Amino acid sequence: MKKIRIACIGDSITEGYGTKNTKSDCYPAVLQRKLGEDVEVRNFGISGFCVLDTADCPYRSTVQYQASLRYEPDIVIVMLGTNDSKIANFAGHDNDFRRTYGELLTAYMDLPGKPDVYAVTAPTAWRRKGELYWDYMVSPEIIHERIVDMQKLAAELLDIPIIDMHRMTQGMKEYFEDGIHPNTEGSEKIAEMIAEKISESVQKYAKRKAMEKTE
């Protein structure tokens, strides 16, 4: 039976920065172990990258983005937006974020296989005590007050499911040691929450591929 393909789109949080081992402890690797051998989870996360095309590191300009489209996924998990909160990226382009985020989601929705696409809001971020902000530092305030709302609105307009990781991580500060990136335990928690939210899609594709095998 063909495996169910899951593409994880994201930044350093997806790539696994902050964990003990980025290869084995990133949330996509944990998700793979939780879902089993009938599923193939591919990590397309890249540290520092953003939704906005005007940002310093736009995700849609990368070879990973093109590779994720060619992967022909059955399920797509998009968790991007944290790096867009940096003042140098967001200021003057805040009105472009929802449009660009919607375009990114639509690119996956319009793939020939019509995969199930999940919009995952940016996880909660915390400011370190006494920390001063500079232009290229993640802003917890912008994430909380602007980005999450625009992610939800874009997903609602496209009628696709939202996984509100921002809300689900609000009480998990101890798992984000640097205030931005989940540690190994935090990555495990994120994988658990995503596995639960996509379970219906996984079951749907498992049944579909089982039927294809018998035909």
Image (cartoon, rainbow, N blue to C red):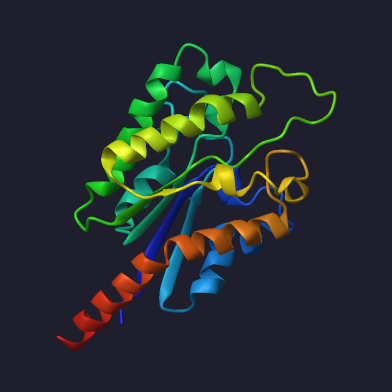
Task: Give the x, y percent position of residue 202.
Answer: 37, 69
Q: Residue furthest left?
A: 215
Question: Residue 83's image quarter?
Answer: top right
Image quarter hosting the N terminus: bottom left
Q: Residue furthest right?
A: 130
Observer able to see residue 145: yes
Image quarter hosting the C terminus: bottom left
Q: Nearer the viewer, residue 49 or 117?
A: 117
For image coordinates 43% across by 20% down, the residue present is 54
For image coordinates 40% across by 18% down, the residue present is 95
Q: Nearer the viewer, residue 39 or 22?
A: 39
Number of labels in the image equals: 0
Relative to 82, 99 lies left or right: left
Question: Vertically, is 149 above or below 69?
Answer: above
Question: Vertically, is 3 above or below 30?
Answer: below
Task: Give the x, y percent position of residue 52.
Answer: 43, 26
Question: Residue 72's image quarter?
Answer: bottom left
Question: Residue 114's image quarter?
Answer: bottom left
Task: Give the x, y percent position of residue 192.
Answer: 57, 64
For image coordinates 50% across by 59% down, the residue present is 194
Relative to 183, 118 lies left or right: left
Q: Residue furthest bottom?
A: 214
Observer able to see residue 139: no
Task: Give the x, y percent position of residue 3.
Answer: 36, 74
Q: Nearer the viewer, residue 115 or 12?
A: 115
